[in-house]
């Protein structure tokens, strides 16, 4: 048997259950705000999902609980696609986003923590749907299946294969002997960040609803807001600082927080990826601030620094929140932001893009290439944190980078079929594959993705999911050799 179909079916049943149960808080919000039509839309969505998920989970009995890597990739790809399809149901049933392409785009954007939207007037959406729209960020940020892995031991199924296929970045930190215990620790850290930021935003004058919405968008690095002008709606330096802090925090490898909690502070400052991440962040903030000052973009030094910090933090962490229309900034500043759209945060964070560690390894490869030109017979290994990186991992990283850039080029060509300008087509592709949200031109921070045709919206939805799952997880399912192991891959 190529795949462990029964185990896959059982886990899919659990995911359907999780999605159904996850809609309950949104239904409660609809009830609190007397949005009864939206409440009924959630009820109509939840009940069938719950029944189907329960039947699949309880009635399916796998012959084997062991999962191969092939099973892990299939589970992750199918479950994320299924979550995006099921998550779009309340939008369509309620009638607020009646078209499938639009509802699927909005939900895929939510779960993939992209934050791109087809809505021209976000504030017209009922509170219940706004809550669900942002809650998908929180679920997708840490990973839908990471949550499921914490429950998998009760099903008798090992979760390491799934986690490896879903984790962002080329590394997967295993904090405890059991992957389920690691998943629990990561979610505890994630929930602590959520609670703390919500409280801090309440102190800043937000009500509980807005605090939760923007906390989900920050810790999940997604960027959905309940207002058309995003965080700029509040015009508060305090709120900007709090959200900036948590965006940057959630761009750090979550396994490092475990080290900090256990007072292993040296592990944090020894981590090469963390140091480069902070260096890039600070350097870009300084360069943008100087450029904005030089061009007199803002009236005061305080505003210049404030907007520089927020937008740089928002883009490098792929959150996509906005406090100002950065598409109106000078070209130098926009070019820096465009560069950050390829970088992203650290491995095992909630961010998208290529990740700092891959950029770091790429530069080390370039450095080694220069050294080998001078000393052709020298044996020079690529090292990270004082340890040599295995050749197969270096190869995997370079393969990913070339694949990423290749898909950006091909995807931009496909998007250009809608006949929009070059900047719009290119930045839309870069933004969606990097899970960022806003781009430049007609998809800038003051615009949205409603301009695209339905086929392009569906294409971008798959691009967002592929970007969140590090490309290979989705692409493997499209290869004949995945479904037929006897058919060798031609290279």
Image: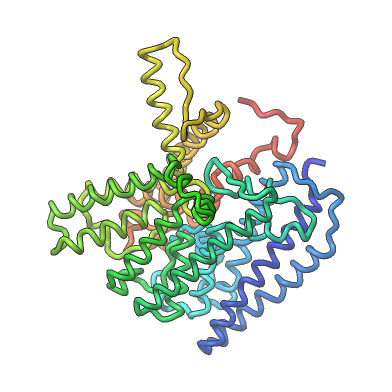
Res. 464 in view? no
Q: Looking at the image, how many numbered discs can be counted on the residues?
A: 0
- Residue at the extreme front: 263
Q: Tell me the quarter of the picture where residue 121 sits.
A: bottom left
Q: How is the image coloured?
A: rainbow
Name the quarter where the N terminus is drawn: top right
Q: Picture coordinates of residue 289 (x, y %)?
A: 21, 53
Name the quarter where the C terminus is drawn: top right
Residue at image location 40% in from the left, 60% down from the top: 451
Residue sitting nearer the eye, 450 or 175: 175
Res. 487 in view? yes
With respect to residue 63, does 273 lie above or below? above
Residue at image location 81% in from the left, 50% down from the top: 65
State left or right for residue 293 relative to residue 134. Answer: left
Q: Tell me the quarter of the picture where residue 89 sits.
A: bottom right
State left or right for residue 451 relative to residue 484. Answer: left
State left or right for residue 219 relative to residue 367. Answer: right
Residue at image location 31% in from the left, 74% down from the top: 234
- Residue at the extreme bottom: 34
Q: Picture coordinates of residue 29 (x, y %)?
A: 54, 82
Q: Picture coordinates of residue 134 (x, y %)?
A: 49, 69
With respect to residue 382, does 49 lie above or below? below
Residue at image location 56% in from the left, 28% down from the top: 390
Q: Picture coordinates of residue 321 (x, y %)?
A: 37, 62
Residue sitting nearer the eye, 138 or 118: 138
- Residue at the extreme top: 377
Residue sitting nearer the eye, 273 or 451: 273
């Amino acid at each position: 048997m190529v795949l462990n179909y029964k185990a896959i079916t059982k886990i899919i049943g659990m995911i359907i259950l999780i999605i159904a149960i996850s809609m309950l808080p949104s239904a409660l919000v609809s009830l609190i705000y007397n949005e009864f039509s939206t409440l009924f839309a959630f009820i109509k969505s939840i009940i069938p999902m719950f029944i189907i998920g329960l039947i699949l989970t309880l009635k399916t009995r796998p012959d084997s609980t062991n999962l191969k890597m092939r099973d892990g990739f299939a589970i992750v790809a199918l479950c994320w696609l299924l979550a995006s399809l099921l998550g779009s149901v309340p939008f369509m049933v309620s009638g607020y986003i009646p078209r499938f392409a639009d509802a699927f785009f909005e939900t895929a954007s939510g779960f993939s923590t992209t934050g791109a939207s087809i809505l021209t007037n976000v504030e017209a959406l009922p509170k219940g749907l706004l809550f669900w729209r942002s809650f998908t960020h929180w679920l997708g940020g840490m990973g839908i299946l990471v949550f499921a892995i914490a429950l998998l031991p009760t099903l008798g199924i090992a979760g390491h294969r799934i986690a490896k296929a879903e984790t962002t970045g080329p590394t997967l930190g295993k904090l405890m002997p059991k992957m389920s215990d690691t998943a629990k620790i990561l979610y505890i850290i994630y929930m602590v960040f959520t609670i703390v930021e919500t409280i801090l935003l309440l102190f800043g004058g937000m009500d509980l609803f807005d605090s939760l919405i923007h906390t989900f968008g920050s810790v999940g690095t997604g960027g959905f807001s309940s207002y058309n002008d995003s965080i700029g709606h509040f015009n508060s330096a305090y709120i900007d600082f709090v959200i900036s802090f948590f965006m940057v925090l959630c761009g750090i490898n979550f396994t490092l927080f475990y080290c900090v909690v256990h007072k292993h502070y040296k592990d944090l400052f020894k981590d090469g990826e963390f140091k480069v991440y902070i260096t890039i962040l600070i350097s870009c903030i300084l360069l943008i601030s100087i450029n904005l000052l030089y061009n007199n973009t803002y009236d005061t030094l305080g505003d210049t620094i404030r907007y520089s910090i927020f937008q740089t933090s928002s883009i490098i962490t792929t959150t996509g929140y906005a406090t100002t229309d950065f598409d109106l900034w000078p070209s130098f500043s926009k070019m820096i932001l465009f560069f950050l759209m390829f970088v992203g945060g650290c491995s095992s964070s909630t961010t998208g893009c290529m990740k700092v560690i891959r950029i770091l390894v790429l530069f080390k490869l370039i450095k080694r290439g220069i050294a080998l030109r001078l000393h052709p017979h020298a044996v020079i290994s690529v090292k990270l944190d004082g340890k040599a990186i295995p050749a197969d991992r270096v190869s995997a990283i370079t393969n990913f980078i070339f694949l990423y850039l290749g898909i950006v080029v091909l995807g931009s060509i496909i998007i250009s079929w809608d006949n929009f300008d070059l900047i719009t087509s290119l930045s839309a592709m870069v933004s969606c594959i990097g899970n960022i949200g806003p781009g430049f031109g007609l998809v800038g921070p003051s615009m949205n993705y409603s301009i695209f045709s339905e086929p392009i919206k569906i294409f971008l939805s798959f691009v967002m999911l592929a970007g969140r799952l590090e490309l290979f997880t989705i692409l493997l399912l499209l290869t004949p050799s995945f479904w037929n192991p006897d058919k060798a891959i031609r290279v």
